Amino acid sequence: MSFVPGLGIVKGMALTLRRFFEPKVTVMYPEVRLDVPHKFRGRLQLLYDEWGTLKCETCFQCAQACPIECIDMGGIDTRGRYHVHWGAAETYGERREESALRRSGRVVPDPAYLPFAPVDLAQVDAILDEHDHDPARMLDILEATQAAYGYLPVAALKRISHETGAWYAMIYGTASYYAHLRFEPAASAEQAKAVDEHRPAESTYLAALDAALDGGGRPGAPARA
Amino acid sequence: MPRWTGAGAPALRRGPDMTEILKTPARWPTILLGRARAKDPRDLDEAVAAGAFAGLRRAIRDLGPTAVIATIADSGLRGRGGAGFPAGEKWRTAASTDADRRYVVANGYGADPASHTDRTLMLLDPFSVIEGTAIAAYAIGANEAFIAVRAEDADVIASLSAAIGAATDAGFVGEDVSGSGHDIHMTVRPVQGAYMLGEETVLLKALEGKRGQPEQRPPHPAESGLFDRPTLVHNVQTLAAVPWIVSEGASAFRATGTTGSPGTVLVQVRTPGGENGVAEVPLGTPLREVLGLGGELPAGRSIKAVLIGGPSGGLLPPDALDTPYDFEPLRAAGAHLGSGSVVVVDDRTDLLELVGVLTRFCSNEACGKSIPCRIGVKRLAEIVARREDGLLRPVDMELATDLATDIVASALCDHERLATLPLTSGMRYFGSDFDPARRPQPASTEAPR
Ligand SMILES: Cc1cc2nc3c(=O)[nH]c(=O)nc-3n(C[C@H](O)[C@H](O)[C@H](O)COP(=O)(O)O)c2cc1C
Ligand code: SF4
Ligand code: FES
């Protein structure tokens, strides 16, 4: 095709104009529902609410739904617990740390990158052997890994992903869901024990319920073991 | 995780962590807790002498899979997990869907931390759950069955593992069950880490080692569940009723409860200053009688409301006490069976605080998959908190009503359909407690949250 100067822009503007005058449709969700693909999460845009809080809840549904893992995100999860990260780790800490190293010749002392630090993989390899490298036994593998390292190091998760064939994003999604799994070493042994022994959400709820009912129900009743 | 077999099992600890069994009228039949008074619930010989595994034997020798399913359908047994779906229909679907493998999953997770009904059943009569699960597996043609329980509940895990070990040694589960040529491998699967694990599709996700978020239904698990195979998921109480039905017959089961919902359920009754224990109650019993099991309120106090169904339960007023404890009537009144918990709320309780506690728990435990649930329920909890602090905005109560309607309408799983109940039932029956004008505005000039 011969080159016509400005044709591209005219085509583009024609589309813009056409869209501009097309009738707009507002679907009154949830009364009316469009047929949308199973994994549809709406248009991805990070919006702020009227108080200036980011509306994204860091639920990772968008990243988990993306079949080629092209969505990365990082932040603090909604319960303020973890520095979360999703997607290829080299997009974040590892690569930046590496290039910073290359440029300055020294390690960047940023604790946010600690989870990416290499660990001795012998233990996770043993755990994987014991579980037949079976992705269907992921929870057992993750629990055993946490028991071995005290937390779930990213390097171990990547090894698990490599060895079981499960996507890193799926493993991360599993690990970040369950309250008893953690990505950072516990502050102290007592804290780890306290969290392991009792699910904080439940004891808080039971205490609040007892308080709301004026504690009348069961004096000194033990919480569920 | 320790796995005990019959002989070496540690003795069952009775005492503070064993929930009390409430006394019920003698005329009420015991279908689920019939053997609960056994000296050692894990002693297979004692249980067999009291009738355990008679149902399984009858199912295999006299009935065969098709007749077992027909019996369960005739009995009108409905799911005890909360929704009350007819069991027979699920069994038919699971048995008739083409597949190379099928599974049975007994849901003993007991999501509501304040209700110990399922736990009590599994501790006091583990064999009824095991036998029911085995019959279900035999009927639908499943070779693998899982009993999912809380990983933090060592007593239940020990009790069930020991009982499965004993039943395997006796040939009631395992290879070639009771000479039927059918293998049923049964395992206890401890899971933990989220309230939502009680929901069936979430539980299946956990058993597959995945993130625990519900799936769109249909397809129901009975068609495509664990590892995409037909999977029968039942509450442990539903399964524990199965052996009784198979050995006593469907019409005997129909003699208890109501025409629409035959049989009994376990209820956790809690009365302030009175009892907090588990009782077996025929479906359709008036609420008043259920409350009666918990004893009297201390002098000078009166009932203000009844909270039925656990954290996402509904608040009913004292004049609704004639409502039958049954699936549809409770739904119509604005509550639901849920976790089987019935809590008497006396006049010292601030309903708003109670609703706040419940809504916050529901919001915190939302899995995050569906946006109306994740954000909508959180906003409801915020509205209740603003109301508690006296910082309500003029449109807030109206907003709460609208929001609740939208959350229910766009729900993905039952959690979000139900999470609005404490607030909506509270506003429906106890409007004046929720009236913004009733609470004084605080002196503080803090900006609204
Ligand atoms: C938020 C939520 C929590 C639930 N928790 C439980 C539970 O703890 N135990 C249970 O048996 N069913 C629970 N269910 C109901 C299950 O999804 C499912 O309906 C049930 O296990 C099916 O068994 P059934 O047919 O015997 O009722 C829950 C449902 C929801 C939505
Ligand atoms: S993480 Fe969740 S809330 Fe945030 S943009 Fe993705 S889908 Fe939306
Ligand atoms: S709890 Fe998961 S969508 Fe509501």
Image: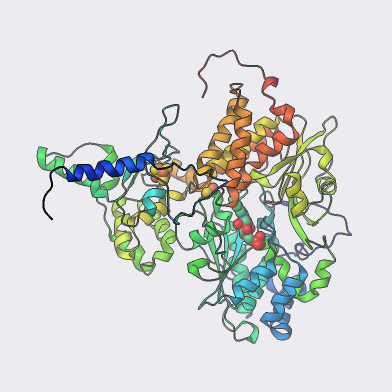
Q: For the N terminus of chain A, which image quadrant?
A: bottom left
Q: What residue is at 45 percent from the left and 57 percent from the top?
A: A38
x and y percentages locating residue B403 in the rendered image: 58, 37
Q: Is residue A21 left or right of residue B96?
A: left
Q: What residue is at 69 percent from the left and 54 percent from the top?
A: B117
Q: Nearer the viewer, residue B141 or B117?
A: B141
| Res. B272 visible in picture | no
The quarter of the picture where residue A189 lies is: top left
Q: Is residue A104 left or right of residue B143?
A: left
Q: What residue is at 75 percent from the left and 29 percent from the top?
A: B348
Q: Nearer the viewer, residue B98 or B30?
A: B98
Q: Nearer the viewer, residue A54 or B9?
A: A54
Q: Is residue B229 left or right of residue B71?
A: left
Q: Quick check: which quadrant has ligand 1?
A: bottom right
Q: Is residue B293 left or right of residue B99?
A: right
Can you say whether B211 is above or below B432 in the image? below
| Res. B346 visible in picture | yes
x and y percentages locating residue B76 in the rendered image: 76, 67
The quarter of the picture where residue A45 lies is: top left
Q: What residue is at 74 percent from the left and 52 percent from the top?
A: B267
Can you say whether A123 is above or below B179 in the image? above
x and y percentages locating residue B194 in the rendered image: 52, 50
- Colour scheme of the rendered structure: rainbow
x and y percentages locating residue A64 in the rendered image: 38, 53
